[in-house]
Structures are given as structure tokens and as C-alpha cells.
Image: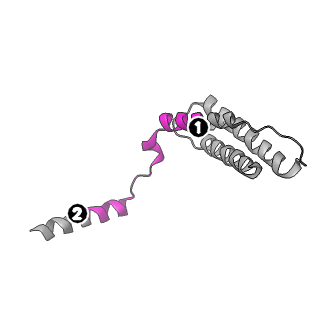
Amino acid sequence: MFDWYVGMLALSGTVMIVMAVVKGGQSEASRWLNAILGAVFLGYAGYLAFVFEGGSYLILFQAFILPVLMVVNFVRSADWAALTTKPTPTQQAWRAYQKEQDRLAKL
């Protein structure tokens, strides 16, 4: 159970830091909050994994509500059009060629 908790903390921290790095519609405050809390989650996971020598510890599964809320906020505020890449002129020409070939094949 301990290893799962540490892994989930590390995963949550990593996801929050990645969301902070991606620019795509989030406010500056939201990005900073993601970065700070992601660092806290990663730091605590690192502490538990490498420094903690045993004894008692408290597992707070309620702490995982926050990363879920941050992911929901990220998805809702993301400017998906800006995050997706636009096709290059070569890709556009290839798609036009394929459409023309499909049109000719139907004749």
C-alpha cells in the first residue's frame, strides 16, 4: 500500500507540473498553483521514497481530489485549437491529392 501511495503522489505531481508547463488558455495563477502543488507532491513522494525510514505515516486519499480538480480545470480552460498543430503545406497537398484520387475512383 505504501508503494502505491508514493507512486500516486509522484504521478500526481508530475501531471500537475506538466499542466503548468503547457501554455494553452490557463491563467497565470492557475499555472503557478499547478507548479507549486506539483512540486509539493513530488517532494513528498521523494521524501517518503528515499528519506523516510519507517514508523507511522498518514495516508490522505483526499489529497488526490486536488489533482483531479486541477486536471478538470486544465481541460476546461485549454485552448485546444492552439494546442493542436496545423498541417504543413506538404500535408495539405497530400490530403488534396488523396481526395482527388478518391473522387476519381468513384467515377
Q: Quick one: SS at disc 1?
A: helix
For image coordinates 83% across by 46% down, the residue present is: 47
Q: Is residue 87 left or right of residue 19?
A: left
Residue 19's spot in the image, x, y percent?
60, 42
Q: Which mark is residue 101?
A: none
In the rendered image, residue 83, in percent from the top left (x then y), is placed at 48, 46
Magenta segment main secondary structure: helix
Cα distance in 3D space between marks 1 and 2: 42 Å
- Mark 1, other Cα within 10 Å: few <14 / some 14–19 / many ≥20: few
Label 2 element class: helix
In the rendered image, residue 95 lying in the magenta stretch gets the answer: yes
The residue at which mark 2 appears reads as: 99
Q: Who is closer to the viewer here, 96 or 39?
A: 39
Q: Is residue 93 or residue 26 the one in the foreground?
A: 26
Q: Amino acid at mark 2?
A: Lys
**Over which residues does the magenta segment extend?**
69-97
| x 67%, y 47%: residue | 14
Residue indicated by mark 1: 68
Res. 60 image quadrant: top right
Q: Quadrant of the C terminus?
A: bottom left
How far across and how far down the image is residue 23, in percent?
A: 56, 41
Would you say residue 100 sits in the magenta stretch? no
Q: Quadrant of residue 80?
A: top left
Q: Position of residue 46 (x, y in %)?
A: 80, 48
